[in-house]
Amino acid sequence: MALPPRTRPQARAEEWMRLALDEARAALTTGDVPIGAVVVGPDGTVVGRGRNRREADGDPTAHAEILALRDAARTLGSWRLDGCTLVVTLEPCAMCAGGIVLARVPRVVLGAWDEKAGAAGSVFDVLRERRLNHWVEVTGGVLADECSRLLLDFFSAHRRGAAEAPGDDDGPAGPAPGGTADFGG
Ligand SMILES: [Zn+2]
C-alpha cells in the first residue's frame, strides 16, 4: 500500500463495515439480532471480531462490541486498545459505549443509528461525555442503509413468525408502536 490508511478514510471505513456486516449476518444462524463488530488495529488489520450472541449464549451482555473488544484484547495481549478503531453495524448501547471507553478505543465507526437506545449521540453520548477522561471520535452512518435493512428484515420476519411473543423478545423495550423494533444492541 503506497497510501497511508487515513488518506482514504471513507473507503476504509466502508471496507471495515463490510466485515462487521459479515459478522452481523452470522448472528442470524443462532437466531440472534444481526449486529456485528470488528476491531481494527493501528496497522489497519482486523484484531478482533464479535457478533451478537445474546440468544446463543443466553447472556444479556453478549453484545457484538463487547465480544469484539475482548477478542482484540486477547489478540493484542492488552486491555488497552490504543490506536484501534471499533467498527459496528449499529450505534452502541450504554453498556458497549462504556466498554469502548474503558478499553480506551480512540475511534468508533458505526453504521445505523439507534434512536431508541444509542449511546453514541442518539439517547446518550457516553463516547463524547466531557465528564469522562476519555473521548472517542465517532463516524456515523457508514453503510447505514445496509446495516439497518438487515435489522429491519430480521424484525419483520420475526414478527411474522412469532407474533405470540410481543413482550421482551426484541429487547428491553419491546417493539415500538410505530413499527420500528428495539434492536437490543
Ligand atoms: Zn451493546
Image (spheres, helix red, strand yellow):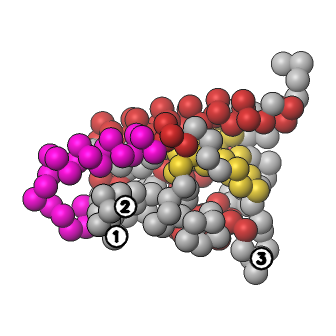
Residue at 53% x, 49% y is 112
Name the foreground residue: 72 vs 164. Answer: 164
Asked if residue 37 shows in the view, the reply is no
Label 3 near ligand 1 (CB < 8 Å): no
Residue 159 is covered by the magenta coloring? yes
Instruction: Please state which amino acid type lies under the numbered disc 2.
Output: Asp
Instruction: Please state which amino acid type lies under the numbered disc 3.
Output: Arg
Residue at 73% x, 40% y is 41
Q: Which of marks 2 and 1 is nearer the N terminus?
A: 1
Q: Position of residue 63 (x, y in %)?
A: 46, 55
| Quadrant where the image shows the N terminus | top right
Query: Of helix, strand and loop, which mostly describes the magenta segment?
Result: helix
Instruction: Please state which amino acid type lies under the numbered disc 1.
Output: Pro
Label 2 near ligand 1 (CB < 8 Å): no
Question: Does residue 75 appear to the left or right of 106 in the view shown?
Answer: left
Label 1 near ligand 1 (CB < 8 Å): no
| Quadrant where the image shows the C terminus | bottom left
Label 2–label 1 contact, CB within 8 A = yes
Q: Mark 1 points at which residue?
A: 172
User: For residue 130, which numbered disc appears in the image?
Assistant: 3
Q: Of the residues tagged 3 and 2, which is closer to the observer?
A: 2
Q: Name the element at disc 1.
A: loop
User: Badge 1: how crowded within 10 Å, few (<14), some, or many (20+)?
Assistant: few
Question: What residue span does the magenta drawing correspond to?
Answer: 148-169
User: Badge 3: how crowded within 10 Å, few (<14), some, or many (20+)?
Assistant: few
Q: Which picture quadrant has residue 62?
A: bottom left
User: For residue 182, which numbered disc appears in the image?
Assistant: 2
Q: Name the element at disc 3.
A: loop
Q: Which picture quadrant has residue 184?
A: bottom left
